Amino acid sequence: METTALAENVVTNTIPQQFVVGATVTGVLAALLLAHWLLRVLFSKTTAGIERKIYLYPLPVRIWHWVNLAVFLALLFTGVGGWLKLWNMKGTLINAHIVLASVYLFLWIGFVAYNMLGNGKNYKIRPGILTRCVKQGWYYLAGVMRGAKEPFIPSEGDKFNPLQQVAYAFIIYILIPLFILSGMLQMIEPIHGLMIRTHIFVCTFTAVLFAITHIYMVLSNGSIKNMIDGYERYDG
């Protein structure tokens, strides 16, 4: 009976237009990344170099990274599923979503506090960032195809290349706070609809687009080991 009711609910409820738009944009991005990967496979020139590595990601950062990922995926599963009315967001499921959101809040507070103790220097936007972002972006688009040398070399005082720096700073200091705030403000009736649209359409789909791009960059550059053993690898 419960399975039949769920199936009827999926058929009779129209998929929100915002979901269609977000899913379309996500699909286009995934197709572009796939095309980029195919071009790299077909045309990229590799240059022999000595792999060097530097310890940049201590254990607390790595633990935060994986726990944060797990909580985000669980929030995505419960939240988007409820939005699409694949299940009723009441009782146990809504309680689980609220608990997960609370954990996500404390994870964010903990990471911001950690940044205030010194790690925040890696997210500081310095003069000339636009020029460096263009150079790094061109490397990703075309340089890797020609076997060009990586324009950014990581160090203890400067972990991230300029594109990573801008993206991570945006996620940590703008998107996640907006995510959390819009989720909390959904309970206020006069702005409930606006907060729902902001929370789901703006924040969720932006986070998904970032996650897809991030995963592609990690896998295509073979850098998933960074968040396992803490060492950043690069050609020296």
Image: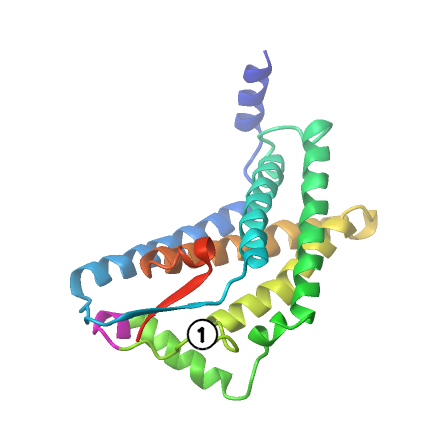
Left or right position of 31 against 22: left
**Residue at left 53%, top 49%?**
66
Please identify the quarter of the rendering in which residue 169 is found. Answer: bottom right
56 and 6: which is toward the camera: 56
Left or right position of 139 against 58: left
Residue 178 visible in image: no
Q: As drawn, which residue projects farthest toward the top? A: 1
Q: x, y (%) of residue 115?
A: 65, 68
**Residue at left 31%, top 71%?**
141
User: How crowded is the residue under tag 1: few (<14 C-alpha within 10 Å), some, or many (20+)?
Assistant: some
Tell me if residue 197 is in the magenta stretch: no
Q: Is residue 157 above or below residue 230?
A: below
Please identify the quarter of the rendering in which residue 93 is found. Answer: top right
**Residue at left 71%, top 64%?**
113
Residue 6 visible in image: yes
Q: x, y (%) of residue 203?
A: 61, 55
Q: Amino acid at mark 1?
A: Asn
Q: Quadrant of the C terminus?
A: bottom left
213 and 186: which is toward the camera: 213
Q: Secondary structure at mark 1?
A: loop
- Point out the stretch of residues depicted in magenta: 143-148
Which residue is denoted by mark 1 in the rendering? 161
Q: As drawn, which residue projects farthest toward the bottom? A: 127
Left or right position of 66 against 197: left
Please identify the quarter of the rendering in which residue 9 is found. Answer: top right
